[in-house]
Image (cartoon, rainbow, N blue to C red):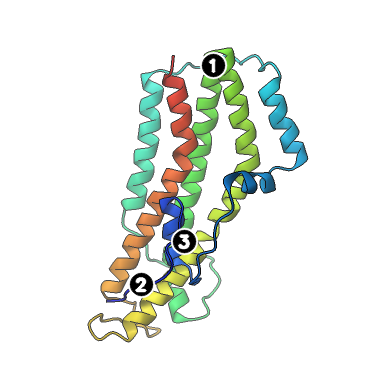
């Protein structure tokens, strides 16, 4: 069975530690402080917008639905649906209109890459829609909460593009992880594998990879729902 190499421990949230395990990098450079990283992501236009959201009176909320148990249940249903899709069987058929792969390993990994991309798109769409709806409801509860909703809108507009760029690298990291597990199993007589161009790879290493892929998706789902969980907590506070 393929074993992970010994590396320096990576500090940070579970999702970051998981991605570090998939990476080829053996080192573990110290991550910059949160304040330093935010300073890099906020240009002066965004900083002014955030300052206005904090200092100016919040805008009048538009009429619309209020938060209640039904809205909370809908959030739970959306998350459960995404969880079910992550845990479902992975479609291993080649994607239509896809460019021909360069080699057998790339062809074998392609369905997993496509599955991850599909789940990412579903998570991004569902979480973005929920976040906007909950923010609108928060703005209707009080002036203080309307200010919080405006700040959240600024933060989403500023940080989401950066977040999407970073998350778009996850499939490539999984591809590296797939390659390493495959190569290690090919040299391990106890971990049978097939790697020719006509036979799909098999063996315990593949079960390990599939579980790692699902673990990464579950961790990413938690990251995407952090703002939603915060909005839900604010909406339940009276």
Which of the two labelled residues, at mark 1 and mark 2, occupies the earlier sequence position? 2
Callout 1: 10 Å neighbours few (<14), some, many (20+)? few
SS label for mark 2: loop
Q: Badge 2 is on which residue?
A: 4
The answer for how far apart the CA atoms under marks 1 and 3 are is: 38 Å
Residue 101 appears in the rendering: yes
Apparent side of residue 90 relative to residue 141 in the rendered image (left or right): left
The answer for how far apart the CA atoms under marks 1 and 2 are is: 52 Å
Q: Depth check: give the residue in front, 31 or 200.
A: 31
Which of the two labelled residues, at mark 2 and mark 3, occupies the earlier sequence position? 2
Callout 2: 10 Å neighbours few (<14), some, many (20+)? few
Q: Badge 1 is on which residue?
A: 64
Which of the two labelled residues, at mark 1 and mark 3, occupies the earlier sequence position? 1
The reply to whether callout 1 and callout 2 are in contact (CB within 8 Å) is no
Q: Depth check: give the residue in front, 114 or 55.
A: 55
Callout 3: 10 Å neighbours few (<14), some, many (20+)? some
């Amino acid at each position: 069975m393929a074993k992970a190499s010994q590396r320096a421990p990576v500090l940070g949230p579970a999702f970051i530690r998981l991605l570090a395990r998939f990476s080829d990098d053996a080192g573990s450079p110290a991550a910059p402080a949160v304040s330093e990283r935010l300073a890099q992501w906020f240009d002066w236009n965004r900083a002014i917008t955030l300052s206005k959201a904090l200092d100016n009176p919040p805008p009048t909320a538009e009429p619309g639905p209020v938060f209640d148990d039904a809205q909370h249940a809908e959030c739970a249903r959306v998350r459960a649906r995404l969880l079910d899709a992550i845990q479902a069987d992975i479609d291993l058929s080649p994607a239509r209109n896809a460019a021909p792969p360069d080699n057998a390993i790339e062809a074998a990994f392609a369905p997993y890459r496509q599955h991850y991309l599909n789940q990412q798109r579903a998570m991004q769409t569902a979480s973005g829609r929920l976040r906007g709806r909950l923010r609108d409801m928060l703005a209707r509860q009080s002036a203080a909460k309307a200010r919080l909703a405006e700040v959240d809108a600024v933060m989403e507009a500023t940080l989401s593009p950066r977040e999407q760029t970073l998350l778009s690298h996850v499939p490539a990291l999984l591809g590296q992880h797939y390659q390493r597990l495959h190569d290690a199993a090919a040299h391990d007589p106890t971990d049978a594998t097939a790697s020719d161009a006509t036979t799909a790879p098999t063996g315990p290493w593949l079960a390990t990879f599939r579980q790692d892929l699902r673990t990464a998706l579950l961790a990413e789902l938690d990251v995407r729902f952090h703002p939603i969980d915060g909005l839900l907590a604010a909406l339940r506070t009276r």
